Amino acid sequence: MVNRISILGSTGSIGVQTLDVARNLNIKVEGLAANKNIDLLEKQAREFYPKIVAVKDEELAKVLSARLSETDCKVVGGIEGLKMVASIESVETVVTSIVGIAGLIPTMEAIKHKKNIALANKETLVTAGHIVMSEASRMEVKILPVDSEHSAIFQSLMGNNKEDVSKIILTASGGPFRGRKREQLENVTLKEALKHPNWSMGSKITIDSATLMNKGLEVIEARWLFDMPQEDIEVLVHPQSIIHSMVEYKDGSIIAQLGSPDMRLPIQFALTYPDRKPNNFSKLDIIKNGSLTFEVPDLEAFPCLELAFEALRAGGTMPAVLNAANEEAVGLFMEEKIRFLDIPRIIENVMGRHSIKSDPGIDDIIDVDLWARKIVREVVN
């Protein structure tokens, strides 16, 4: 089991739940980092006494530094601060849960310093999967999935030969608008989109779940995490969110991982792997939950999923364009500047304007990310 961790994105949903796991298992938290929520970050620092606390917003880092001046916590700011939290010498595993491409650089820094990664930032592999996995292999570090779906696949693969795998089956809840046709989605509100039926998550990932882009990003992540071709990755809607994902083998057997829709369970497994530890988290009552059902996703109503498959097929820099355009469009929807169905329309528009670079480096990924965001603003304005 891991004894010392750092958390990138400690004030977000995954970060807060990771701290629940750390409390339960008495894991020492050596580093905390957040974008700008210094009120919560201060409370976390006073409870866990990390060596380093980082705030991406450098002005807010100065404010937090003054607040924590009587403690031994070193407060740092900017991307360099995030990199410091990612590379603390005593840390064994870095939990990366910063939302968006912002997690890419500190994750690479952690790998560079031979830290195992508990990966909750799917955009890291979406935008630069080939680079990240190659570097992790070179540095001999583990990438352990925290997403419930990828944790389920990881667990369903344990003890089996990869060459015996027929396909990966990612399950999706369907989000708050499951069953609605495209014309019924034209005027849905932000408030409606944020009402996920099963999971308690951050706002951005909740909107991605409503559009099914979250599942599209998970398809791309699974391609790199498990080295599987996209034609061997399938998505099924499973409204109960009890089966978190499945693996089908060439003999026809399907192995699935089941559990309550509680993110602390996959977080804990990433931190205790290959062991399992007791906890007081919610346990699945199969009888109480009743039947389990499955549906084929409606790609006409939820085109973001198909756009993700298209980006994966195109390869190169296209997944980074998909991700950046989605982040910007979701941000605009959350500001109520565009409508729900404008999100896939904008993403498709930006993807159509992009000239793919087939073998990009990190700098290319970052440049393309900035380009796509700029185009989104031009399209909207």
Image (cartoon, rainbow, N blue to C red):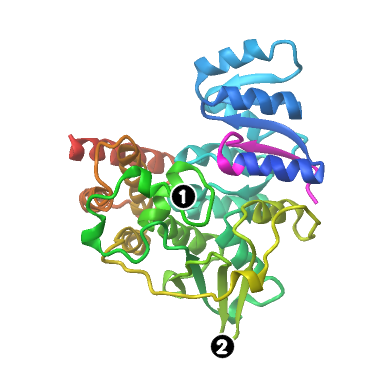
Q: Residue 215, position in %: x, y?
A: 44, 60
Residue displayed at 48% across by 37% down: 102
Residue receiving disc 2: 252
342 to 257, vertically: above or below: above
Residue displayed at 76% across by 26% down: 49
Give the residue type at disc 2.
Gly
Q: Residue furthest front?
A: 288
Q: Is residue 178 visible?
A: yes
Q: Which corner quadrant holds the C terminus?
A: top left
Relative to 67, 350 lies left or right: left
Q: Residue 222, position in %: x, y?
A: 51, 62
Contact between labelled residues 2 and 1, with CB atoms less than 8 Å apart: no
Residue receiving disc 1: 128
Give the residue type at disc 1.
Ala
Q: CA distance from mark 1 to mark 2?
A: 33 Å
- Residues drawn in magenta: 1-14
Task: Assess whether residue 259 is covered by the magenta stretch.
Answer: no
